Image: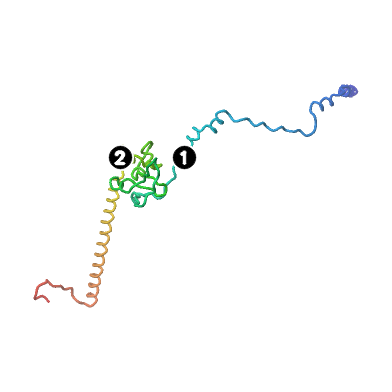
Amino acid sequence: MKKAADIRSFFEKTLSSSPGRNQRDDDTFPRGDCTIMPTPAFPPSISEAEASTNPSTEKMDRTKEKAPESSDLGTLESGPKQPTINFPKTQSGDRTRSFSDVYYKNHPWLEYSVENDRRYCFECRHFATGDIRDQNEKFTKTGFFKWKKKEDAIEKHEKSDKHSDCHQKYLEYLMANAAGDVREKVANQSQEAIKEKKQYLRVLADIIYYLSCQGMPLRGHDEKADCE
């Protein structure tokens, strides 16, 4: 027991014989509030800076913007929207140009949006699938608004493979709807005929019931002059 006490006293002396240890610890890790310096803001990269000031980039972004959507175009039920109005005029160089309703006669697929003064292809809008670009996209999504050389643009679109395919699909749609209308009319006529025959049988049943209740025989005539 005495030896254990001597060992404890040895460690106490060793710890107490290290002056300034706590002092150095306190100096190494100072107490008090620590001020956190804000993280410096890094300058934008060269590519970002160029993109924000490069006019070609701004032009590219503008070209990606979608044209205003038109809500006044025709549906499959109504057909192409072909208004006959006083079309607005636009200045093109030293000439004034505008759309004309004369094009409806030779190009029945053509429709016009009053909201944004643009032309569209009714058939391609509803039946075009896959990737649509160039001239076909102008008549399908964005709308065509350049009145200069409009005849060439219309003919070029009308002769394209995309338009021919959509035109065929539209004709098939019309034929399917017409066949559906015929079947519906036949079905309605059949229902009317069945209804009339049921009414006829009901009248005959009432006559037979009345005669049987009165004890009267069922008699007819043979349409002869002497037949009573």
Amino acid, disc 1: Glu
Q: Residue at the far bottom: name it.
A: 214
Measured as percent of width and height from the top left, residue 177 is found at 30, 50
Q: Nearer the viewer, residue 80 or 13?
A: 80
How far separated are the C-alphas under marks 1 and 2?
A: 27 Å
What residue is rendered at 78% in x and 34% in y? Answer: 33
What residue is rendered at 13% in x and 73% in y? Answer: 221
Query: Which residue is label 2 attached to?
Result: 155
Q: Quadrant of the N terminus?
A: top right
Is 28 drawn above or below residue 150 in the view shown?
Answer: above
Q: Residue at the far front: name it.
A: 94
Residue 11, picture quadrant: top right
Q: Nearer the viewer, residue 107 or 103?
A: 103
In the shown orientation, is residue 40 left or right of residue 212?
Answer: right
Mark whose residue sits in front, 1 or 2: 2
Measured as percent of width and height from the top left, residue 15 is found at 86, 23
In the shown orientation, is residue 187 left or right of residue 40?
Answer: left
Is 222 drawn above or below residue 162 in the view shown?
Answer: below
What residue is rendered at 26% in x and 67% in y? Answer: 199
Q: Secondary structure at mark 2?
A: helix
Q: Secondary structure at mark 1?
A: loop
Classify mark 1: residues with Cα within 10 Å, few (<14), some (14-19) or many (20+): few
In the shown orientation, is residue 48 left or right of residue 71?
Answer: right
Residue 128, picture quadrant: top left
Query: Which residue is label 1 attached to?
Result: 65
Measured as percent of width and height from the top left, residue 195 is found at 27, 63
Amino acid, disc 2: Glu
Classify mark 2: residues with Cα within 10 Å, few (<14), some (14-19) or many (20+): few
Is 108 drawn above or below residue 17 in the view shown?
Answer: below
